[in-house]
Amino acid sequence: MDRINSKLYLQNCYIMAENERLRKKAELLNQENQQLLSELKHRLSQAGPSNNNNNNNNNNGGGKNNSIPDLNLTNCSSSKNASSKSKKK
């Protein structure tokens, strides 16, 4: 019984260490994501309102797609809309 408990204890320690490693990695990725989002928002704010008009035209199927897509849209709804538009064409 003690042998099984020791084995389970070691497995638990390994799992906790792996969990901590993954938690730190997730935190670093989240920080990087926040920095990139901040940089993207800064670039979009410098582009001015004319970029928003181009972006709206591109989302409706007109013109070339040179603008940065709106990240505030949910991935589910935008991917469903895009797939339904491509099927209708």
Image (cartoon, helix red, strand yellow):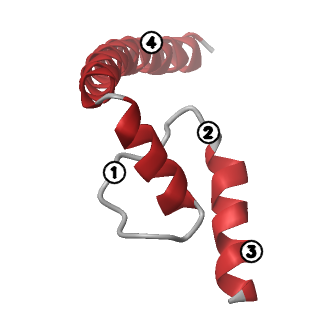
Label 4: state its secondary structure: helix
Picture residue at 48% right of the left edge, 61% below the top? 58
**Label 3 environment density (alpha carbons within 10 Å; few <14, some 14–19, many ≥20):** few
State yes or no: discs 3 and 2 in contact (Cβ < 8 Å): no
* Sequence-wise first label, 2 or 1: 1
* Sequence-wise first label, 4 or 3: 4
Q: Position of residue 23 (x, y in %)?
A: 40, 14
Q: Is residue 31 left or right of residue 56?
A: left
- Residue 73 numbered mark, or none: 2
* Sequence-wise first label, 3 or 2: 2
Mark nearest the camera among 4 and 3 is 3
Q: CA distance from mark 3 to mark 1?
A: 22 Å
State yes or no: discs 2 and 1 in contact (Cβ < 8 Å): no
Q: Which quarter of the rendered picture does the N terminus lie within?
A: top right
Residue type, label 4: Met
**Label 1 environment density (alpha carbons within 10 Å; few <14, some 14–19, many ≥20):** some
Label 2: state its secondary structure: loop
- Residue 84 numbered mark, or none: 3
Q: Position of residue 20 (x, y in %)?
A: 38, 11
Mark nearest the camera among 2 and 1 is 1
